[in-house]
Image (tube, rainbow, N blue to C red):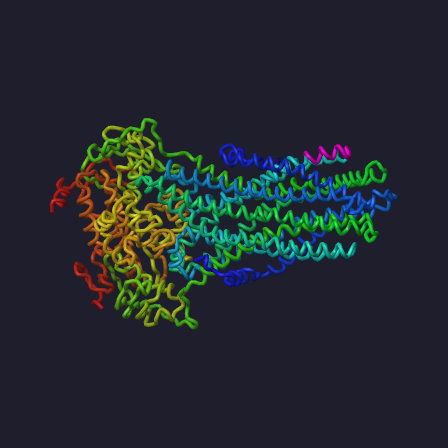
């Protein structure tokens, strides 16, 4: 068959297997009914046309014909229902696996090309393409296998010569479909890439619309959009030209096959070797034989799209995990009590020539605040990622209390860390829900206290709905500073032994920064903290300051060493 | 919101979308002609071959059959070729429409930015890609099949009437019934689900994007399972709606078969007595039945067409609803300014909605040409809002903003932004090269000028050291460069602009203190001769070189209290 049924999909998806069985059963039943309908119709026409039979004489056959027509209609509905239901289940299953992969196993992973819009688009729109595959293409594929067999078997009984012709043309058709199908598949893949790029491009443009307007560039972007659209049209038309060409060839083959059969029947009829009834049946069955084959060819481009879409999802599912999940899964020692040591840690992002970190030596002393300073791009954020085990070092090791982080239970380790990233994500929900991200069971009073501690109390109080204000996708957009305060409130509420703050005061004014740094000092008391900071207010808090250089990180400790009591003094104040 | 879109609104929106663009009407006519031709050829093929077999059964001399044999083959070949042409032509039309619609709705949302962006990128992505994609199918899946069905209905009935008038009437009646009933049935059942699917998909896409973006934070928070569960719930809801849709379409598919079967049986019940009575030649009976079978092949796709119509109409209504949001418009007769660059806010009051608190209240601020001013204030004090008002990303509720004495509302926005450039805090880096991102500031800047601007923000060495230099890609949202580099690239872009007034919102965020100081001084030096308003929480980075440092507090501007500015102000305070 032209495009093989996606073995991966059918092999791994239980709903897909169930659906295939149902489609097979319905297809077989349908084939029998097709032959029965042709035979009955031919019988009735023959009796009426040649022997001038009355309605009364044909009553039984007409009733049987009505029953067959009803049954065929119901089977059509059954195909549709089973196909679409199966597709819906498969779609959900694949999306669930995709989300599980990205959420549970490898949160830092984005598929190569790394475009969130493209990925989400594939997971929603792309997986939808499977519907066309399972509800449209697959039933046709079953019919295309079963119906020609049934038809040839029946015609052999009525007219062996015609059956011979039919049996010869079918492999010819399949051969053409394979030859044309290969080219169409490659082009469909190219088109999917274009479509994904187009979706990502559109998201990019829409996200940057304000920037474009600020520079009067919206008109120019319009032209780019037009060019990209035109390129998409060109590429798609090329694919369709080939895909439809296969349909044309199939139709011409079917036409020649039918014409040959009709000619044979005609000659045999004129010779008197065949009756009208048999001739009509064969003639009615010839299109039924080629029909499903032709429809398979017609829906080929849809099926190629679906196959490519599922391949993209599997590609994401298959891409290598940068984390080494330990089998041992030791209980982690508390970083509040045991020091965390970076021992000759190197890290290189996949596909990058330059290492982000090289042979880094660093100790986070238990209960102390360590600040990391360094120019932009020195690998400060990478260091944080490794500490959180969002990625593992390419060389060297990070150990807590002497145990390699890779030997610890991943979730238990992460649950010890409160993290405030540089650009925190606000999830759709209320501000309170966002603050309570790490502790969804927190009481309203605790949440309010955390908001106040993070300096978010005032702006939240000014909102009409206060903490219950919805934020995130499609709702109110908080300013960068406000989002940062919500993330800080998150960390305060989380109350975890290891604090990891990535420039928490970057967006804040000096007065707020002072409040925050005091709160950080309070919160860091009795905990281990890693501060990535430019702000002198924060580095002042640190017991140790570690400087990272560009490219070649320095290994010296406490470059900007402060009086060790700095933090204690602030806390005591 | 979507549920409330009434039938007239959808019809109106659809009518506006359906209006063909330049040259599209001709392509539509060609597609319909090709499709109808293919349908007639299919009918002709079946009818003539039915006749051929019946005639052959009467065992006439083979020569008498030659004409029929030739026409059977001609019909078959014509059908194949016409169908190929029709498919290419109609898909080309749909893709042209897609390009046109995409541009049109892009133009419609441009005036809504930055407000439109606040709706969430997930929802916007879904709207634009899915809704515009859906609307493009209007001709391909609705208009062309409907017109072809009507032509076939008329043609087949006429042909049957010529053979046996009663048969013509029966065929007309049963085909007309199917033509009306099938689309009505499938359309009605599907309309409810079609209305619900797009918002569910949008929500699922939005949730997917935010969970993928925030996957690391969720992992740290230990909430990955909870958010996976939330995705599963949205997914299950979508699946439930999809199952409802499946039930509707399968019922319609069965109904189509039943109606076609009933039609053929009725035709037989009329034609068989007619043959018996000698009113219809026996050789035509097969032709008549085959003709009816072929005609139904063209009517049955109307079920799918009706479903597509609903989908198109809902998508079109949603797109128009988005486009109909109030936008900031240019004046009918814009005034012009010399562009000396004197900005002033007079008694400006602003709030986002009448029920919300004032962000700016009776604000007075003057920025003289060439003056360098730092504006500080607590986060949320309205600093960025003020920046937006200066480039007309919003209009004051009360008071006015003027450029060289002219109210901004009397200027064309293009002219205003040619004079006043804003580098917003969330300034976007596009997923393209460093060069292309910088050229947004000034299209015709030379490489030397780009590097000079990069030198101000101390990125020239970094850019030249990259293997691909200025042609290095920055990734989605600039994710391939660090936060500080992202900020500085945006800054370099603003410096390139030839505007006489620059508004820089937090130009030195994400930079360490020494770098922030060097960059700020470089920016001040590079802005010699043009006015600069730096919105910053760190005015000290200017090293006392700002002419004035102002503070925004309680919606008003004050002279900053701790005005440590040891520099030498070039102008007195306003």
* Left or right of B318, for residue A563: left
Q: Quarter of the image for the N terminus of chain B: give it.
A: bottom left
Q: Nearer the viewer, residue B91 or B499?
A: B91
Q: Which quadrant would residue A380 be assigned to in this image? A: top left
**Is residue A315 located in the magenta-colored stretch of the structure?**
no
Residue farthest to the front? Answer: A56
Judge left or right: residue B174 versus residue A380. Answer: right
Please state if A134 lies on the left or on the right of A411 as rendered: right
Q: Position of residue A255 (x, y in %)?
A: 72, 43
In the rendered image of this protein, does residue B511 appear above or below residue B373?
A: above
- Residue shown at the point (73%, 39%) measured from the top left: A39
Q: Nearer the viewer, residue A263 or A479?
A: A263
Observer able to see residue A202: no
Residue at (29% x, 42% y) in the render: A438
Q: Residue furthest top?
A: A328
> x, y percentage for residue A215?
39, 59
| Relative image position of residue B532 (x, y in whole percent) | 29, 61
Please provide percent x and percent y for residue B11. 53, 61
Report whether A297 appears left or right of B443: right
Q: Main secondary structure of the magenta part?
A: helix
Q: How many marks?
A: 0
Can see residue A387?
A: yes
Quadrant of the frame with the C terminus of chain B:
bottom left
A160 in magenta: yes
Residue B549 drawn above or below residue B203: below
The vertical placement of B3 against A110, above or below, is below
Q: Quadrant of residue A323?
A: top left
Given the current orientation, which residue lies at the most extreme right position? B61
Which stretch did the figure color magenta? A149-161
């Amino acid at each position: 068959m032209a495009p093989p049924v996606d073995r991966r999909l059918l092999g791994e998806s239980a709903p897909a297997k169930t659906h295939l069985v149902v489609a097979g059963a319905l297809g077989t039943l349908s084939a029998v009914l097709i032959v029965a309908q042709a035979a009955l119709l031919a019988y009735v026409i023959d009796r009426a046309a040649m022997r001038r039979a009355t309605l009364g004489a044909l009553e039984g056959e007409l009733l049987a014909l009505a029953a067959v027509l009803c049954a065929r209609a119901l089977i059509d509905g059954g195909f549709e229902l089973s196909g679409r239901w199966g597709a819906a289940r498969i779609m959900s299953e694949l999306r669930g696996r995709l989300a599980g992969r990205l959420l549970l196993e490898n949160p830092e992973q984005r598929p190569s090309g790394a475009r969130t819009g493209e990925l989400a688009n594939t997971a929603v729109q792309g997986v939808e393409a499977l519907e066309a595959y399972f509800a449209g293409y697959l039933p046709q594929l079953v019919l295309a296998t079963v119906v020609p067999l049934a038809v040839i078997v029946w015609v052999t009984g009525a007219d062996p010569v015609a059956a011979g012709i039919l049996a010869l043309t079918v492999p010819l058709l399949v051969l053409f479909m394979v030859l044309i199908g290969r080219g169409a598949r490659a082009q469909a893949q190219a088109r999917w890439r274009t479509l994904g790029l187009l979706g990502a491009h559109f998201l990019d443009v829409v996200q940057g619309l304000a920037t474009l307007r600020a520079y009067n560039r919206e008109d120019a972007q319009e032209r780019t959009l037009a060019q990209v659209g035109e390129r998409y049209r060109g590429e798609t038309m090329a694919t369709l030209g080939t895909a439809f060409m296969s349909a044309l060839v199939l139709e011409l083959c079917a036409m020649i096959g039918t014409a040959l059969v009709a000619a044979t029947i005609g000659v045999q009829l004129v010779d008197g070797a065949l009756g009208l009834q048999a001739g009509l049946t064969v003639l009615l069955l010839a299109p039924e034989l080629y029909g499903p084959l032709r429809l398979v060819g017609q829906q080929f481009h849809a099926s190629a799209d679906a196959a490519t879409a599922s391949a993209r999802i599997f590609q994401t599912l298959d891409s290598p995990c940068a984390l080494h999940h330990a089998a041992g899964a030791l209980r982690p020692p508390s970083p509040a009590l045991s020091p965390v040591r970076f021992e000759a840690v190197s890290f290189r992002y996949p596909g990058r020539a330059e290492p982000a970190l090289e042979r880094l030596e660093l100790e986070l002393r238990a209960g102390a605040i360590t600040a990391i300073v360094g120019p932009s791009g020195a690998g400060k954020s990478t260091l944080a990622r490794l500490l959180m085990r969002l990625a593992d070092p390419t060389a060297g090791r990070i150990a807590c209390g002497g145990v390699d982080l890779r030997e610890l239970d991943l979730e238990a380790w992460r649950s010890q860390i409160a993290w405030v990233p540089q650009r925190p994500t606000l999830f759709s929900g209320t501000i309170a829900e966002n603050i309570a991200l790490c502790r969804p069971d927190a009481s309203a009073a605790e949440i309010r206290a955390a908001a106040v501690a993070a300096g978010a109390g005032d702006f939240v109080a000014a909102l009409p709905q206060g903490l219950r204000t919805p934020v995130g996708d499609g709702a109110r957009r908080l300013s960068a500073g406000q989002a940062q305060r919500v993330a800080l409130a998150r960390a305060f509420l989380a109350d975890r032994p290891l604090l990891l703050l990535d420039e928490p005061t970057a967006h804040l004014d000096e007065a707020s920064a002072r409040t925050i740094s005091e709160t950080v000092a309070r919160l860091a008391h009795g905990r281990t903290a890693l501060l990535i900071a430019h702000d002198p207010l924060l580095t002042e808090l640190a017991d140790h300051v570690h400087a990272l250089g560009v490219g070649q990180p320095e290994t010296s400790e406490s470059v900007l060493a402060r009086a060790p009591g700095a933090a204690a003094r602030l806390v005591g104040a | 919101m979507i549920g409330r879109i009434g039938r007239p609104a959808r019809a109106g929106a659809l009518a506006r979308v359906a209006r063909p663009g330049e040259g599209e009407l001709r392509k539509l006519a060609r597609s319909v002609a090709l499709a109808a031709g293919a349908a007639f050829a299919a009918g002709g093929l079946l009818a003539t071959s039915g006749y051929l077999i019946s005639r052959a059964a009467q065992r006439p001399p083979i020569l008498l059959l030659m004409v029929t044999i030739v026409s059977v083959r001609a019909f078959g070949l014509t059908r194949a070729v016409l169908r190929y042409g029709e498919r290419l032509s109609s898909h080309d039309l749909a893709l042209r429409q897609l390009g046109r619609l995409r541009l049109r709705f892009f133009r419609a949302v441009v005036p809504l930015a930055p407000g439109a962006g606040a709706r969430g990128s997930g929802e916007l992505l879904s709207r634009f890609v899915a809704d515009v994609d859906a609307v493009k199918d209007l001709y391909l899946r609705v208009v062309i099949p409907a017109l072809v069905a009507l032509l076939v209905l008329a043609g087949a009935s006429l042909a049957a009437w010529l053979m046996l008038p009663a048969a013509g009437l029966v065929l007309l009646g049963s085909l007309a019934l199917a033509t009306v009933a099938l689309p009505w049935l499938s359309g009605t059942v599907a309309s409810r689900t079609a209305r619900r699917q797009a918002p569910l998909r949008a929500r699922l896409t939005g949730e997917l994007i935010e969970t993928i973006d925030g996957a690391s934070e969720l992992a740290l928070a230990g909430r990955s399972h909870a958010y996976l569960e939330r995705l599963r719930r949205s997914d299950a809801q979508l699946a439930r709606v999809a199952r409802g849709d499946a039930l509707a379409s399968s019922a319609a598919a069965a109904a189509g078969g039943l109606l076609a079967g009933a039609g053929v049986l009725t035709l037989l019940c009329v034609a068989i007595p007619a043959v018996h009575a000698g009113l219809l030649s026996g050789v035509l009976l097969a032709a008549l039945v085959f003709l009816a079978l072929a005609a139904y092949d063209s009517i049955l796709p109307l079920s799918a067409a009706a479903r597509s119509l609903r989908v198109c109409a809902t998508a079109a209504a949603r797109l128009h609803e988005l486009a109909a949001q109030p936008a900031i418009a240019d004046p009918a007769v814009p005034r012009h300014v010399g562009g000396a660059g004197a900005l002033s806010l007079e008694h400006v009051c602003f709030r986002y909605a009448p029920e919300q608190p004032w962000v700016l209240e009776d604000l007075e601020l003057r920025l003289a040409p060439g003056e360098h001013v730092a504006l500080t204030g607590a986060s949320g004090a309205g600093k960025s809002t003020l920046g937006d008002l200066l480039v007309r990303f919003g209009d004051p509720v009360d008071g006015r903003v003027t450029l060289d004495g002219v109210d901004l509302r009397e200027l064309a926005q293009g002219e205003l932004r040619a004079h006043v450039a804003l580098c917003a805090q969330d300034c976007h880096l596009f997923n393209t090269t460093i060069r292309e991102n910088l050229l947004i500031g000034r299209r015709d800047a030379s490489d030397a000028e780009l590097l000079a601007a990069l030198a101000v923000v101390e990125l020239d060495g970094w850019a030249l050291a990259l293997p691909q230099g200025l042609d290095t890609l920055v990734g989605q949202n600039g994710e391939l460069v660090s936060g500080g580099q992202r900020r500085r690239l945006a800054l370099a872009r603003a410096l390139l602009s030839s505007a006489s007034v620059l508004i820089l919102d937090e130009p030195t965020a994400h930079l360490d203190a020494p770098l922030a100081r060097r960059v700020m001084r470089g920016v001040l030096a590079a802005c010699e001769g043009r006015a600069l308003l730096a919105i910053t929480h760190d005015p000290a980075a200017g090293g006392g070189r700002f002419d004035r440092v102002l503070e925004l507090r309680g919606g008003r501007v004050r002279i900053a209290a701790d005005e440590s500015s040891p520099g030498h102000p070039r102008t007195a305070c306003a």
